[in-house]
Image (tube, rainbow, N blue to C red):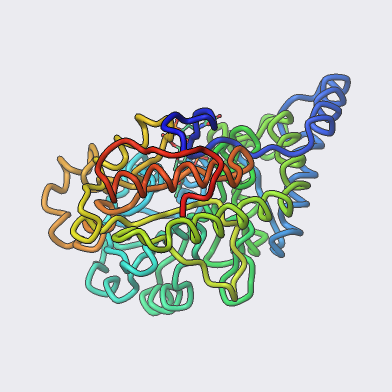
Amino acid sequence: MNDTNQCGPLFVGCPNQGDRGVLLARINDLLDRRWFTNNGPLVQEFEQRIADYVGVRHCVAMCNATVALEIASHALGFAGEVIVPAYTFVATVHALQWQGIRPVFADINPATYNIEPGTLEKLITPKTTGIVGVHVWGRACDVEAIETIAAHHHLQVLFDAAHAFGCSYRGRMVGGFGRCEVFSFHATKFLNSFEGGAVTTNDAELAEKLRLMRNFGFSGYDNVIYQGVNGKMTEVCAAMGLTSLEAVDAIVATNCRNYDCYCRFLADIPGVAIIAYDPLEKNNYQYIIVEIDEQASGVSRDGLVTHLHSHGIIARKYFWPGVHRMEPYRTLQPDAGRSLPNTEQVSARVIVLPTGQAVDEVSVAWVCHVIRDFINCGHRPTGNRGTSPR
Ligand code: T4K
C-alpha cells in the first residue's frame, strides 16, 4: 500500500445523504409555501413516517435530541436524582443537570457498553425519580431488566435512543420502550435531518404534553398551559429527514458492507477487536467500534488515534473520558469513577472508525492498513494503495 492517503480525509460522522434532487424539490416546495417552521406539513409528514417505521403511536419531532431529552425529562416529572450511565455522550447527562436534576452514574456492562441492570438497585434512594438507559451504538439496553426494576420502585424510564434508529430489541423496533424514547437526527447520525431529534411514545397524553412543551407550552392562541421551550423542528430539517428516511435501506447496506470489510481486514491484528452486532436483531451498523488491548497490540489507544489522524483518518475516542470526568460532574462528584470500573476501562480502550456513505471498501482497506502497520511495525505504512491489506 502507498504511504500517502489517496482516499481524502476520512471523518467519523461524515453525513449520509438521500436523493439530492428529491431534497431540493422539497426545499423548493417549502419556499413556495412560505411555511418554514411551527409544525409545518413536512414536520407532520416526517413524524407520521417515523412513527410508522418504528411501529409506535406517536412521534414528536424536535430541533435536536438534547432539547428532546430535556423536554422529555421535564414532561416525565424527573426531579431529585435520576440514574444514568457515564458512558454516553455528555448531552444525555447535561439534559438532566440543566434542569437541576442530580445525575447518579451507573456502571455499564463491558460486553454491551450499556447500563448494567445489576448495579441499579443500590443506586436507588428516596430521591430517585427515574432511569435513563442509553442504547449505545444502537445495541439495545437490557430493556426488560431495567423496566422491571423501575416498576418495582415506581420509577419512570426514558431511553436515549440517539444511536438506535432502525435497531431492534427482541424483534421489536426501538422507539416504543420505557415511557418514551429519544432519537437524534443530527448530521452524524444514521438518519439525519441536518439537526433534529424526536420523542416517540405509545402514550397519547404524554405525546400531547411533549407537543405543547416544545412550543413554549402554548395550547392554542394566547393560552399557555405548561412551562415550555422552543424545541421545534424546522421544515427544511424535516425535508432532509424525509429524504434520509427514504434512503435508509441503501445506507444500511453500505454500512453493513463497510462493517464486513472492517471485520475481515482487522480479524488477525493482535489486540484489535471490533464489536459484534447480534444478527438476530436489526441494527443500522452506523458505528465501527474497536477496542484496543494495549498489552496484546503493543501500542497505546491514544497513540494509534494520533497516528490515524496524522494519516487523515479522523477516528474518535467516544466516550472518553466518561461524562463523570467532564465538568461540572468531575467537580460535583469527584469520586464517581471509583464505582464505574467498566466505564473507565471501556472508555480507555475504544476507537470509533469512519463509515457511512462517504466510506468505500478501498477506504476501509486503507484505514485497516494504517492500523495494522502501526501495530506490526510501529512505523509509517508502506505498500500500494488499493490492494488488500492482508
Ligand atoms: N445522546 C447520545 C447518546 C448522543 O450520542 C448524542 C449526540 C445526543 C444524545 C445528542 O444528540 P443531538 O442533540 O446532537 O441531536 C457529535 C454530534 O454532534 C452528536 O450529535 C453526537 N451525539 C456525538 C456522538 O457526536 P461532536 O462534538 O463529537 O461533534 P464534532 O463536531 O466533533 O463532529 C463529529 C464528527 O462528524 C467529526 O469527525 C466531523 C464529522 N462531521 C460532522 C458534521 C456536523 C462531518 O463530517 N460533517 C458534518 O456536517 O458530537
Asked if residue 80 shows in the view, the reply is no
* x and y, in percent, of residue 57 in the image: 71, 62
Q: Nearer the viewer, residue 278 or 197?
A: 278
Q: Residue at x 24, y 51 (%)?
A: 348
Quadrant in the rendering for residue 90: top left
Q: Nearer the viewer, residue 136 or 367?
A: 367
Q: Residue at x 29, y 60 (%)?
A: 271
* x and y, in percent, of residue 107 in the image: 27, 63
347 above or below 331? below
Q: Nearer the viewer, residue 371 or 279?
A: 371
Q: Would residue 117 be found to the left or right of residue 356 on screen?
A: left
* x and y, in percent, of residue 91 in the image: 40, 42
Q: Residue at x 54, y 64 (%)?
A: 179
* x and y, in percent, of residue 321 in the image: 25, 45
110 above or below 385? below
Q: Residue at x 46, y 48 (%)?
A: 74
The number of callouts visible is: 0
Q: Nearer the viewer, residue 304 or 159?
A: 304
Asked if residue 122 shows in the view, the reply is yes
